[in-house]
Amino acid sequence: MTYAKIESGVVTNMSTTPEDGYVEVPDNISPGMIQNKDKSFSNPPKTNEEILDNLRVKRDQLLRETDVYALSDRNLSDEMKKYRHDLRNLPASNSDPLKIVFPKKPE
């Protein structure tokens, strides 16, 4: 059994024994989680910085996957040049990280 102290709807402390001010919660609850109105728990929403960090990781991976096309002995198609250019402009090309759409990779 797990017990949690919840302050302002946020799990602040955990205990394996019942303590004053603690309530019983499921075992998968951890500090920082938010108690919803229906008494369920969820992780807090990600910050814009975390979203942008994750986006940059994905962008960098997509660029690495097409690096082979940019070798000096290969010719990049105009579509691939645009794709790689658009990837490099992410996330700066969009101010709302929740509305960023990755460009479609050319065939």
Image (spheres, helix red, strand yellow):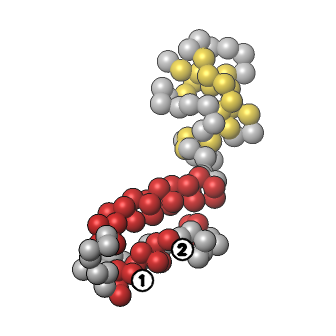
Q: Is residue 87 visible?
A: yes
* Residue at the (32%, 63%) spot, across then down: 65
Label 2 and label 1: CA atoms lie apart by: 11 Å
Q: Where residue 82 is drawn, which disc sits there?
A: 1
Question: On screen, 70 above or below 79?
Answer: above
Q: Dot 1: few (<14), some (14–19), or many (≥20) neighbours within 10 Å?
A: some
Most extreme residue toward the bottom is 78
Snapshot quadrant of residue 63 = bottom left
Q: Return the residue at label 2.
A: 89
Does residue 69 appear left or right of residue 86 in this picture? left
Badge 1 amino acid: Lys
Q: Dot 2: few (<14), some (14–19), or many (≥20) neighbours within 10 Å?
A: few
Q: Where residue 37 is drawn, which disc sits there?
A: none
Q: Position of residue 21 (x, y in %)?
A: 72, 21
Q: Secondary structure at mark 2?
A: loop
Question: On screen, 18 above or below 62?
Answer: above
Q: Position of residue 62 (x, y in %)?
A: 38, 64
* Residue at the (39%, 81%) spot, across then down: 81
Q: Is residue 100 visible?
A: no
Instruction: Say which of 6 and 43 sits in front.
Output: 43
